[in-house]
Image: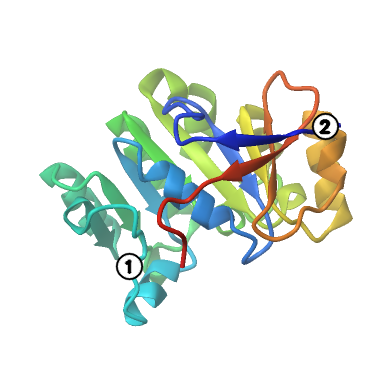
Amino acid sequence: MAKSKHLTTNTIQTDEFVFIPGKTGSGKSVLARVYLSQFPRVVMLDTKASSLRDIKKGKNPWQEVPPEKLAICTSFDSFQQAIEEGIRSHLIYVPPHNEMNFESFNTFFEYCYELEDITIWVDEVYSVCPTPHTMPEYYQAVLTRGRDRNVVTWSLTQRPKGIPSQILAQSTHFFVFNIVKPDDRKELYKVTGAPEMLVRPEDYNFWYWADGMDNAIKAVLELKGGED
């Protein structure tokens, strides 16, 4: 039987690949936000433009990161400029409409791959890889060769079965939130071998599984000072 466990922001190292599936509102982005605020250099690929909606509502899109360390980039050029300035450790790249395409996504991943020493948070894999057989060349390069360059991905999605299986295969840590479709849960069970993946946790609860574990465990991420 799976046991409850407390995890800390030191559980995941900066050279490890992470996969976080879950339905909208289940808590997956909050978990990624809290963990990755502690990492030395991170870019969030925000294809849903949720950061801009937060700003419009007067909310800080990444409240765990000091404002002077955070940059919101609404074009690839501004993302490059922020990297070259070297002042901000955490960046949110919100692609405009004309950069929401396969070629532009590949350019983004290529830039990060060549840059080295960066964690890429993909907030919705399905926006980048709309079928199980479609993946930008340099997203694949990061998955297969990025660890040697200290370039890794935290890949989030609502539909694990609808994305390339290589993303799941290369991930060594899984945080599995509430997933609606039984086929998606079966896919996670097939990859991990953990029977707990077939059981839906409540919202804001999740299963944690790491490479080498026979069973997933119920895990708790404690947020200091609470969470909005």
Residue 219 placement (x, y as % from top left): 65, 40
**Which residue appears at 24% of the width and 55% of the height?**
70
Residue 56 placement (x, y as % from top left): 34, 81
Residue 80 placement (x, y as % from top left): 22, 49
Residue 111 placement (x, y as % from top left): 32, 40
Q: Which amino acid does label 1 sit on?
A: Asn
Quarter of the picture holding the N terminus: top right
Count residues near mark 1 (Cα–Cα under 10 Å), then give few for <14, some for 14-19, many for 20+.
some
Q: Residue 194 carries which label?
A: 2
Render colour scheme: rainbow
Above or below: residue 225 compared with residue 25: above
Depth check, front residue: 154 or 166: 154
Q: Is residue 29 left or right of residue 159?
A: left
Q: Does the image show residue 143?
A: yes
**Which residue appears at 41% of the width and 43% of the height?**
36
Q: Which amino acid does label 2 sit on?
A: Ala
Q: Residue 167 is drawn in which quadrant?
A: top right
